[in-house]
Image (tube, rainbow, N blue to C red):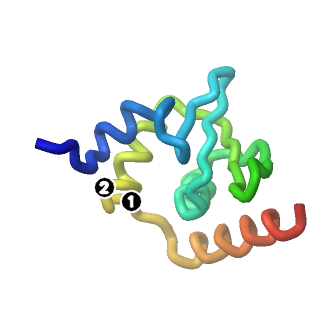
Amino acid sequence: MGQGFSVKHTLDGTDHHPELRATGGGAFETSDFYLACYLRCIGYALDDVRRDGRRVVFVFGDKPGRKTDLMAFFGNKAEVNPLQFVAAIKDLKTLIHNS
């Protein structure tokens, strides 16, 4: 039987997933734009934005509850203020296009 998508597999294997990566030293990276917007809304500090080829990588200060936060996001259980989420989208798009 083939291996299907699993949120637990995705989160446990962040070293092998190109969009999610704990860097050590208290940082967490993602190239998932909407995840980055969500993390901004729930209080993660955006430490850096860099380009990796055509991909944009968002670097956040890590938190002990990151796995729980990611499970909420990917499990469709996350709740944020809609206007705050729209503002985060606009802010990160501005960062992408002006860097």
Within-10-Å neighbours for mark 1: few <14, some 14–19, many 20+? some
Report x, y in % for residue 94: 80, 71
Residue 8, quarter of the rendered image? top left
Where in the figure is residue 47, as x and y percent of width and height?
76, 42
Q: Quadrant of the N terminus?
A: top left
Measured as percent of width and height from the top left, residue 9 is found at 31, 37
Residue pictured at 56% horizontal, 56% vertical:
32
Please name whichever residue, 86 or 10, is drawn nearer the observer in this view of the structure.
10
Circle 2 Cα neighbour tier, 10 Å, few/some/many (<14 / 14–19 / ≥20): few
Q: Secondary structure at mark 2?
A: loop
Q: Secondary structure at mark 1?
A: loop
Residue 98 placement, left or right of 19: right
Q: Quadrant of the C terminus?
A: bottom right
Residue 77 picture quarter: bottom left
Residue that carries the numbered disc 1 in the rendered image: 78
Distance CA(mark 2)–CA(mark 1): 8 Å
Which residue in the structure is indicated by mark 2?
75
Q: Which three-letter amino acid code belongs to the residue tagged 1? A: Ala
Residue 72 in the image: above or below residue 64: below
Residue shown at 42%/46% (left/top)? 70
Q: Residue at x 50, y 30 (%)?
A: 15
Amino acid carrying label 2: it is Gly
Residue at left offset 31%, top offset 46% = 7
